[in-house]
Amino acid sequence: MQENWQVLLKQEIANQYVHNSQEWVDLNISTSGLLNLTIVSDRFINLSIPQRKEESFNLLKSQVPHLSPGFISLYTPQEADSLNLSAPQAFINTSSVQTWQDLAIQAANPQNQPQLPQIEPSLPRTVTFYSFKGGVGRTTALTHVASILAMRGLKVVAVDLDLEAPGLSTAFNLKPQPKYGIVDYFYERSYLPEGLEPSISIAEIFGEVKISNATGRLFVVPAGCLNLDYISKVDDLHATTVIDGDQSLWSVFKREIYEQLKPDILLIDSRTGINQWGALSLIQAADEAIIFLFPNEQNKQGIELLIQSLQGLKNLSINFVFSPIPDVTKSGLSKVKQIWESLLNRIKTVTNENYETDEDEPDLDNSQTPIEELLVVPYLLPIALADSYPVQGTQDYYTKIANLIDEKTDELKRSNVLNTIDQRWNIIESLQFPEVNAADQRQDLNLLFQRTNDFERFLDDTTCLIRGRKGTGKTALYWLFLKHKSVAQKLAHGRLDNTVFLSAHGRFQESRPSRDEFQIIHQILQQDRGTWEAFWRAYLLFRCHQENLFNFPKGKKGAKFSELKKIINNLPIERWQSECTQALLLLSTNSELRLIVKDAIDILLNEEAKNSSQKLWFIYDDLDEDFPEVGGIRQQALTGLFQLVQSCDANRLTEIRFKIFLREDIWNRLSFDNKSHFTGRDIILQWTRIDFLRLALRQATQSEYFKNLVDRISPVAFESIDQATEEAIDKALEILWGSRRRGGNRAKNVSRWVYERLTDSSGTTFPRSLSILLKGAKEQELSYKGQSSSKFRTDRLLQGKSLEFGLKKASEKRCEEIKEEYPDLTKFFDSLKGKLAFLSKEQLQTVWQESAHDIAVFEEFASFLSEIGIIEWREKEKRYKVADIYVYGFEMDRRGAV
């Protein structure tokens, strides 16, 4: 962060004049801009007063020519001793900043602010609702937010510190009103003779608002009863009064209200503008300020002044709410957004300064903050006409504000729990994040397999094509139904109890044709006028024979199958040999045998299954790897497979169901007659955000230590992860990685950050990458072991820097996989090294010409990259954006567009 000119000036003066312990400098800038300076230095020995001033003035003019001098005092150490002058205190008491004047002086003199450690916030947090001007819905918002938080189970205390225009108890329709208010409480303690106990207790100044069906409670501390006595007391009260030796009115109140009620949160309704009660609300009391304003120049100027003053309060979090907004359409909010961006740019980092930031992780999308992130309350007629609050049906407009408060309260609760755990590193070491490998019989898929929103559609009888990018879980589904049948049937909730699963092609069955053999098969089919459809039908019959799914009938019924029986029964079962290939080619090219195979599928498979009340699932995988694209082999082979499906459907083989797993881009490039037959009978495997977060929680809770933490802080029963809401899953994962990437108003939600970083430009998210990211983050986190805990955010186990390290690992692996998928593009992918993650059309065209001109037309090449999720066109910036999941692995320049 760039240092202030005041700091640099003081450093320069000290460099010139301070060289031993007897010498010192005291520099202060008045709020009107005058420089008051005292220098005590041996350099002034034997110099007259005019000479001293000339020398020091020359130095000041060279550093800050615009500054007007005020009181300038220049002494030798001996002269300072004779006047009983001493060096200023090295540290100031931050609690002495209580008024706007204190704040203004502090803001004008950053050179005198000590580098104090970050104060850890504690419960209950105090949130001040403030506005520079009135009429912006501040009190209305507080009543609604307080009610929402109480409905969520929090114990809330709302305090009316708008003492000169009170109304909180009326807004809540508080009945009965307490006998006294906070003005009576403050007044008695301000003027009580020493040694006497106050007669007004804390229990006599609050009342409770009853909220139906609330799991929490809401208490209100009113200002007091409005009468002549109230006016007299308010006029005679001073917010800076010190009582009980060294305590402020607020500190005594907060201690006693906590002892009485043990609240989770205090909400203050502050006085508007710049006055003593607004100062108490913001400077003395607040951990967080929610500032309300209408988007006009008056409010903007006032809030900018406020921000300038509050910059010295390092522990104060500031958020803005725009209210009441008459036009909340996208165009109507454009001015609101401009003011919001302007205000945020004026705020220096006032929270979490010692924590990691994203400074070395620039936002690849250089666009401004989305409008949906603004905190906006529209003009609502029911609220404008209401006498008391909250108004039914309007709570949703205040939910975002409540969420903001709730989020930070949860952070504190997590910190309190995690700070008390001695075995923090043991918990981190226990995290495993196992990648789902359904081919491994030892893995307990009951614990690891995550159903997605597509799973029910996958089970549907009409679904025969399962499309998806490599790494989205196609193969996991394939193995699930073949190697973990009991788990699959459990996940299907009984829908598949009478279903037989068979690998018609794929790695589950070791006895199958190889890639080279398929090339030979293709050549012979062309030579002998055979078809791929006939081959797939014969191959399917042979696979069913291998698995003993049928028996050839005897007697007259079996006569027609005698030749077929002779061919198949003589084939080896355990290993695929040349005889198998030759037999299938014979069955695919001999016209008579082709008809017999077709009848066998109908009679021996479909009819027998129907008689046994069974369904037959024929599952296909590895079609991208086993069928090369060269020579049109893949195109013709897959066309034949889909023609087999169409033929079975046309012949009403109702007990036979196909489940074909195929890469999305391969399906898109396939062209065959009646391809539309599969429209609506296919699904695209995609991981929604809630699917993805559920998988992350499943992986994390493989650690018993972490599972116990979740049970303690944010309970989500493991067996009900699939039924839990996204909010509940999110809260549980905040124990793992926190809620926000860093401090500040623009910090991204961590769950959203992880999901977006592992999603390519086509909207495909990779569960395999999640495991790699989390394993990498754990590895990096353990490297911090033994370092000072002050460097960590204590509300989470994995820091933001660790997640970023894990992202690099995940990106590198994903880039390796994409190169394996598309080896012809390896040179192009390698050429992206050092290029901007935002590429102009001309820049991408240059890389294409140098490394991938095999695709003759640039537009086709760019379209293909978009299809496979590498890039997307950003119309606003007129550039191509490379998906985040590939930027690290391709070693691209991560800066946004300039």
Image: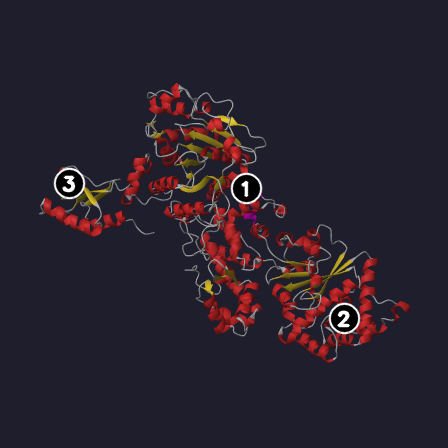
Q: Residues within 10 Å of mark 1 (few under 14, many from 20)?
A: few
Residue 19 in view in this figure: no
Left or right of 92 on screen, residue 218: right
**Where is the C terminus found, in terms of image quarters?**
bottom left
Residue 78 in view in this figure: yes
Left or right of 842 on screen, residue 349: left
Amino acid at circle 3: Ala
311 or 500, nearer to the observer: 311
Q: Rounded to the nearest whole Å, what is the CA distance between mark 2 and mark 3?
A: 107 Å
Q: Position of residue 531 (x, y in %)?
A: 74, 74
Q: Is residue 766 magenta?
A: no
Q: Quadrant of residue 530?
A: bottom right
CB under 8 Å between discs 1 and 3: no
Q: Position of residue 460 (x, y in %)?
A: 71, 55
Q: Is residue 68 above or below residue 821?
A: above
Q: Residues within 10 Å of mark 3 (few under 14, many from 20)?
A: some
Q: Residue at x 60, y 63 (%)?
A: 470
Left or right of 869 on screen, residue 582: right
Secondary-structure class at tag 1: helix
Q: First in sequence, mark 2 or 1: give its number.
A: 2
Q: Is residue 716 above or below residue 837?
A: above
Where is mark 2, residue-wise? 538
25 or 595, nearer to the observer: 595
Residue 80 - label: 3
| Magenta residues, start to end | 703-715
Q: Rounded to the nearest whole Å, what is the CA distance between mark 1 and mark 3?
A: 62 Å
Label 2 vs label 1, nearer the camera:
2
